[in-house]
Amino acid sequence: MSTTVVSFFMDEDLKENMEKVCAEMGLSMADAFTMFAKRVTRDKCIPFEISAVSSKQRKATI
């Protein structure tokens, strides 16, 4: 399997925090993003809920 470079911009603090969390799980960021891409490709959806409604708004309606 050949590989390619994927590049995008991310908040520096977010990147540093993600690197720490990934390292705690024994993963690199590349591993985590590859897992995400494989899941999206397999399931043809984002593997978590995306909503224009905030969690606070959602709880207020319950």
Image (spheres, rainbow, N blue to C red):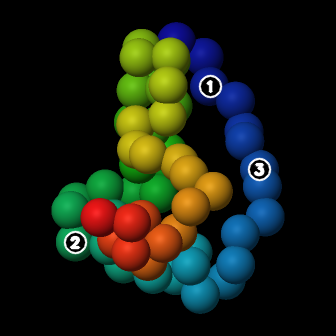
Please state which amino acid type lies under the numbered disc 3.
Ser
Q: State the SS at label 2.
A: helix
Q: Position of residue 27 (x, y in %)?
A: 31, 56
Which residue lies at the image location 72% right of the left edge and 39% below the top edge? 5
The residue pinned by badge 3 equals 7
Q: Residue furthest front?
A: 61
Q: 56 and 25: which one is in front?
A: 56
Q: Count numbered badges in the picture.
A: 3
Say the numbered circle drawn on residue 3: 1
Q: Residue furthest left?
A: 25
Q: State the SS at label 1.
A: loop
**Earlier-in-chain disc, 2 versus 1:** 1
Q: 58 and 1: which one is in front?
A: 58
Q: Position of residue 17 (x, y in %)?
A: 45, 81
Please state which amino acid type lies under the numbered disc 2.
Glu
Above-or-below relation of 12 to 57: below
Q: CA distance from mark 2 to mark 3?
A: 23 Å
In front: label 2 or label 1: 2
Residue neighbourhood size for the residue with mark 3, other residues' Cα within 10 Å, grouped as few (<14), some (14–19), many (≥20): few
Disc 3 + disc 1, Cβ < 8 Å: no
Say the numbered circle drawn on residue 24: 2
Say the numbered circle drawn on residue 26: none
Q: CA distance from mark 2 to mark 1?
A: 25 Å
Disc 2 + disc 3, Cβ < 8 Å: no
**Earlier-in-chain disc, 2 versus 3:** 3
Please state which amino acid type lies under the numbered disc 1.
Thr
In front: label 3 or label 1: 3
Task: For the C terminus, give its image quadrant.
Answer: bottom left
Q: Quadrant of residue 2?
A: top right
Which residue lies at the image location 40% right of the left edge and 37% below the top edge? 47
